Amino acid sequence: MSGTSLDGIDVAIVDIQGRRIQPVAFHSTPYEERVRQAILGVSNTTATTAEIARLHFLLGQLYAGAVQQACRRSRIPLNSIRLVGCHGQTIYHQGEKAPFLGRSVAATLQIGEAGVLAEQLGVPVVSDFRTRDMAAGGRGAPLVPYVDYLLFRHPRKGRVALNIGGIANITAIPPNAQPAKVIAFDTGPGNMVIDALATEFTRGRQHFDRNGRIARQGRLDRRLLNRLLAHPYYRQPPPKTAGREQYGVEFIARLRKLLPLQDLITTATALTTAAIALGIDRFIKPRMRVDEIIASGGGVHNRTLMAYLQAFLPNIRITRSDEFGIDPDAKEAVAFAVLAYETNRRRASNLPSATGAAHAVVLGKITC
Amino acid sequence: MSGTSLDGIDVAIVDIQGRRIQPVAFHSTPYEERVRQAILGVSNTTATTAEIARLHFLLGQLYAGAVQQACRRSRIPLNSIRLVGCHGQTIYHQGEKAPFLGRSVAATLQIGEAGVLAEQLGVPVVSDFRTRDMAAGGRGAPLVPYVDYLLFRHPRKGRVALNIGGIANITAIPPNAQPAKVIAFDTGPGNMVIDALATEFTRGRQHFDRNGRIARQGRLDRRLLNRLLAHPYYRQPPPKTAGREQYGVEFIARLRKLLPLQDLITTATALTTAAIALGIDRFIKPRMRVDEIIASGGGVHNRTLMAYLQAFLPNIRITRSDEFGIDPDAKEAVAFAVLAYETNRRRASNLPSATGAAHAVVLGKITC
C-alpha cells in the first residue's frame, strides 16, 4: 500500500486461511525524496506521458524491493509468499462522472506496474483494485470497508472503524450487520493538510507533526474552523469520497494567507477531528448505536489529534486497531492483502453501500 | 486491437479450440476525430494526468461498444463470447532501458481500462500484454510472432509473415522450426509516414493513400531514399522495435522541407518497402530459405506499395494472409485474441527470440 500521504511503501505480510486473517509482519519503506517529488509532479499538474510510464515501471521495482525487504527483516522466506496485492500509487482520482469528449466518464489512475512485481517476486499479483468498481458505477472508494466488516463486525456492538491516513475515512458496522447495512465514507482530511503545513513549518525537516507537538503549541482559530466546516462536502450524505484535489496545493495556499503556520496546524488538526465527529454525529448516530471507534492510520500517533477527537466525541470509547491484533500503521496494507485474496478466489469485495456501485464486483486484475 | 496508426478499433471474433484458430468475424470502428486528436495529444507531448486517466476510461467504453457492434453486425450473440483480449492504445513505448531517478527502466503505457470492458460485456478480459515481457528484460514487442508461428509454421517451407500497419514488422519461420528459431523484428515504418503525408496532401480528406494512387503519380527520389536508409536502425541486428517516436511529427517535419508532398509520398512508400526488403536480405536470408511472404495489415491495399515490395524482392512469392483464412486487416486483432486465450490457459506466449526477454512469460493481466 502506498497512500495519498506519499510517505512510502507499506508492506503487510498476512496469513489468511478461509476467514481467519492473521497479520504476521509489517514493514515500511519510505520513498526517496526524488521519487516523492516525481509522484507529486505527475499528480498535481501537467506531466509528460513518458514520465508517468517510467514512474509506473520504477514504482513496480520499488514495490518489489519493499516486499523483499519486508520478508528479509521479518525472516519470512520470500518463497512462502503465495500472492501479492498491490494498490499502487494513485496519481489521479475522479470518483464522479463528468462529461468528456461527448461521453460521461469517471476515472482513476494507479501506477506501479504489477508485471514487474510478478516477475521480480515470482508470485501472482492482484492490482488496480479501484477501476472495476467505477466501471460498475461506484466511486472506486472506499474499498477497505469490506475488510473492516470482516475484521470488526460484532454480534451486539456497533463499531466504527476509523482510518486517519492522508484522508480520514470511517466504516460504520451496526451490531450483527449484513454487508449492505455497512455505511462508509471519507469524513474529510486526515493528515494531509497537517503534513503539508508541518513540512513548511519545519522547513522540510519533518513531513508530519510528530506526536502532535506543533499543534499542541498553536492556537485553535474557531472562526476559521467553522468556516472550513461550512464547506458543502461535510453536509453531503454518503457515499462520498475526498481526495488530494480537495486538500492539495491550492487548499494549502489559501490557508497560508489566513493565520501563522503554527496556529494553522492546530486548526487543521481540529478540522480533521471535527470533520470525523461531524460525519459520525450526522450520518451514523441517527442510524445505529456507536459503542466504540477503532482507530488506525498514521493519525493515531498524533496525540493532539487523538485528544481533540475524544473531546469532539465525548461519549464514545476510542480504541486502536492494535487491540484487535492489527498494527494501526498496517491496517490499509493488511486490507489490500485481504482484497487480493478475495479476488484470487473470484469473490466480489466492494461494498456497494460504501462505493455507490450498482452491484458487487470482483476487484482488480490478476497478473499470473 | 487499436494500433499506432490511430485509425480506430479492430474487433476480431475468433473460435479457438486447442490449437485450431478460426476467425469468424471482423469489424472495424473508426475513432471519432476528437478521440483521435486526444490520443495524439497525450502521445506526442505533455498531457495532464487527468486527461490520460479520462481517456483510459473512455477508451474502455469505446472498446466495449466496438465489441458489441461487431457481435451485432455479424449476428453472433454477445453471450457466446467467452473471453476478450484487449491490446489497448499505446500512448508511450520505450523498449530499451534508460536511467530514471537513479534506476534503469524501460516503460510502456497502454490505455483502455479492461474493467470497463469486463463490466459492460460481462466476460473476463485480458489486457496489458506488453508489460510482463518488459519486466523480464524484453522490449515488450513484437508479440504477434508467437501467433504467426502457430498460424503459419510449415514442415518444409520457410515463411515470412509481414504485417504492414503503422510500423512494418516481420516474423521469419524456418521450415519445421522450434519457437526459439523464429526471428522477428520491426523493419521500419509501415503506413505511418505515408498516412501522415497523405493526410496533409489531401488536406485531411483522407488519412491514407487509397490504393497507393498518390504514390503512383509521384516521383521516387532515390537519393533521399538512400539517405533515409542510411539510418543506423536498418543496420542494427534484431531483436529491435520501431515506434511512433522514430517516424512521428519530427520525422515528418524534417521530410517536408526536402521535396514536394506527392514525391515525398512516393519516396515514403519506397522507404517502407525497401526497409522490409533490406531487413529480409540482411537478417533473414543468411539464416534460412524464404519460400514465401504472407502479407497482412492495411498496407496490403496499397497497390503501389505492394508493387514496390515485389520489385525489391524479385525472387520471393508474395501472398496475403487471406490465403490462410485470415483477413489481412484482421490479423493483429486475431493475434491478440489468441494471446488472450493463451494467458487464460496460463501459457507463456512471448517469444524471447523476438522480444529479447530473458525467458518466456504469461502475458497480461486478467480482469475477471
Image (cartoon, coloured by chain):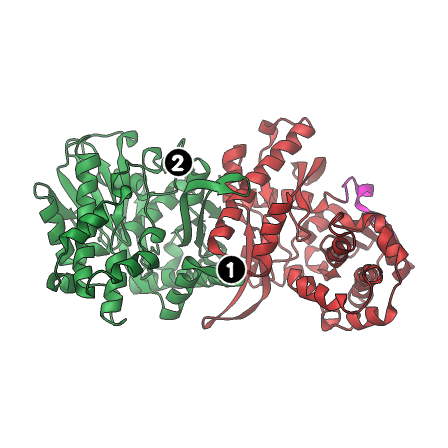
Chain colours: A green, B red
Asked whether B106 or B171 is in front, the reply is B106
Residue B93: quarter of image: bottom right
Q: Amino acid at mark 1?
A: Ala
> Mark 2 or mark 1: which comes first in sequence?
1
- Is residue A153 visible to us here? no
Which residue, given by chain and number where applicable, does mark 1 sit on? A53
- Is residue B109 visible to us here? yes
Under circle 2, the secondary element is loop
The image shows residue B62, relative to residue A165, as above or below, that is above
Residue B321: say if magenta. yes
Report in which chain the residue with disc 2 lies: A
Report in which chain the residue with disc 1 lies: A
What percent of the width, then of the height, locates residue A205? 25, 72
Numbered tag placed on residue A348 in the rendering = 2
Q: Amino acid at mark 2?
A: Ala
Which residue is depicted at the point 14% across and 41% down? Answer: A292
Residue found farthest to the left: A315
Asked whether A129 or B365 is in front, the reply is A129
Identify the magenta region.
B318-328
Say if mark 2 contacts mark 1, CB within 8 Å.
no
What percent of the width, then of the height, locates residue A297? 24, 53
What percent of the width, then of the height, locates residue A206? 24, 69
Residue A366 placement, left or right of B177:
left
